[in-house]
Amino acid sequence: MTRLQKWLSEAGVCSRRQGEAYILAGRVRVNGKVVTELGSKIDPLKDRVEVDGRLVSVEQMRIYIALHKPKGYVTSCLHAGHKVVLDLIDLSERIYPIGRLDKDSTGLLLLTNDGRLHHRLSHPSFDHEKEYEVVVQSPIEDSALRQLAEGISLLGTKTRPAHVRRMSGRRFRIVLQEGRNRQIRRMVRNVGHKVKRLQRIRVAQIHLGSLPEGAWRYLTSTERKTLLRGLVEPKNT
């Protein structure tokens, strides 16, 4: 037996929080009966679950997409008055972006309908690397790069140690294992510089590669298996 909202997430219907909202709104039926209690449990092998009258099945096709997000797009499914990343993907299936990539940044963004993977890659309790290429407006000192690597105090909390590699006078790469709001831009500003261009080139074992800006592709079978296998358990559960 498993909690209904948890199973809706694992089946790729929505996030767990959205599943709770669906249940409270009376949009979910189990074996023909509306369920509105969040503690309700089901047997996925025996029970028939419907959302808005549509049957939910664990056999639904899992979708895993890599998108090269252009500048100017918001990482959201819907944002009034703004272009969103889903505008770039012509699919009828419901998918949602994993994590954030701010409007002014470009690079690799993963999207999926796999609720469990979405949770594992989005939640800060799971360790996975994200690599970025950063170009600043003026040459950056070695001492500033060392500060970025050692950690920067942001709003009273120090960022985790990062791997930093200089590429040129104004360009460097940084690998993070966390994802605070506009973290790199704030870290760079903290050491006296300003980001001119920020591009994410890797998430976990998935690389941006030569994917053109604005284009997307399905992850390969090998990438999917590596991604799912490579996720570690949370440190505190």
Image (cartoon, helix red, strand yellow):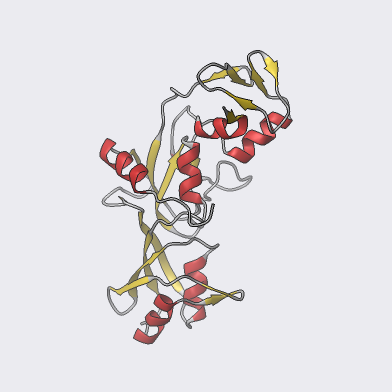
Residue 161 shows up from this direction? yes
At horizontal 57% and vertical 16% (from top left) the residue drawn is 48
Residue 206, x across and y down, in percent? 32, 49
Residue 74, x across and y down, in percent? 53, 50
Q: Quadrant of the N terminus?
A: top right
Residue 119, x across and y down, in percent? 51, 45
Q: Nearer the viewer, residue 194 or 32?
A: 32
Name the residue furthest top.
32
Residue 32, x across and y down, in percent? 66, 13
At horizontal 45% and vertical 24% (from top left) the residue drawn is 60
Q: Is residue 185 above or below residue 13?
A: below
Q: Is residue 59 above or below residue 195?
A: above
Q: Is residue 143 above or below residue 237?
A: below
Q: Is residue 119 left or right of residue 64?
A: right
Q: Nearer the viewer, residue 19 or 91?
A: 19
Q: Nearer the viewer, residue 39 or 223?
A: 39
Q: Is residue 226 left or right of residue 214?
A: left
At horizontal 72% and vertical 25% (from top left) the residue drawn is 26
